[in-house]
Amino acid sequence: MKLSLIFIGKTVSDYLEKGISEYEKRIKRYIDFEIKILKDLKASKSMPIKIVKSKEGDQVLKNISKKDFLILLDENGKMLSSREFSKFIENKQLTGIKNLVFLIGGAYGFSEEVYRRANGKISLSKMTFSHQPVRLLFSEQLYRAFTIIKGEPYHND
């Protein structure tokens, strides 16, 4: 299985970028893994938020295949413990999914087309986080999931 993580827009803070890069290296020890960064757009008077979300959504849909299993990181998604999340990933590996894609949206969230295309949604918390630090938090959780799957001593219950 291949694992992809898609971001809308560049990571703006060096400390976040360094952390994401470190977890990317660690995750690649366990699985074929890539991070894709798609261009973000800014809302303005000439481009309302709905149009921005639609154009970003078009980009997302062009960068995934119909066979990809797409999971959105969304505040209304299912909350999982780290162990439950590791079982989710392990299950996807065992069921023969070729590409598991996680999508962290931009500042305005996802278009309706992306919601319709998604195979599921996961939430990191009932709290709302900026999409920028979520990139680092979720990268760490991906790494943690693989250490749990492999029985390595990173996660403490």
Image (cartoon, rainbow, N blue to C red):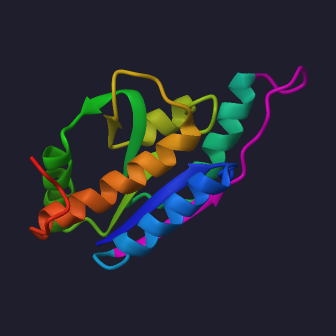
- Give the vertical position of 19 relative to 123 (above or below): below
Number of marks in the image?
Answer: 0
Q: Which span of residues is magenta-colored? A: 32-48
Q: Residue at x 73, y 33 (%)?
A: 52
- Give the vertical position of 88 relative to 80 (above or below): below
Magenta-colored stretch includes residue 142 = no
Where does the N terminus fall, quadrant-wise? bottom left
127, 72: nearer the viewer: 127
Quadrant in which residue 122 is drawn: top left
Magenta-colored stretch includes residue 43 = yes
Q: Residue at x 45, y 34 (%)?
A: 115
Percent position (x, y) of residue 156? 13, 52
Residue 62 in sight from this viewpoint: no
Percent position (x, y) of residue 65? 47, 61
Q: Is residue 96 left or right of residue 133?
A: left
Q: Residue at x 50, y 60 (%)?
A: 20
Residue 96 in sight from this viewpoint: yes
- Give the vertical position of 77 relative to 6 (above or below): above
Q: Is residue 119 left or right of residue 103?
A: left
- Residue lying furthest right in this view? 46
Percent position (x, y) of residue 133? 53, 42
Q: Is residue 139 left or right of residue 37?
A: left
Percent position (x, y) of residue 24? 45, 68
148, 37: nearer the viewer: 148
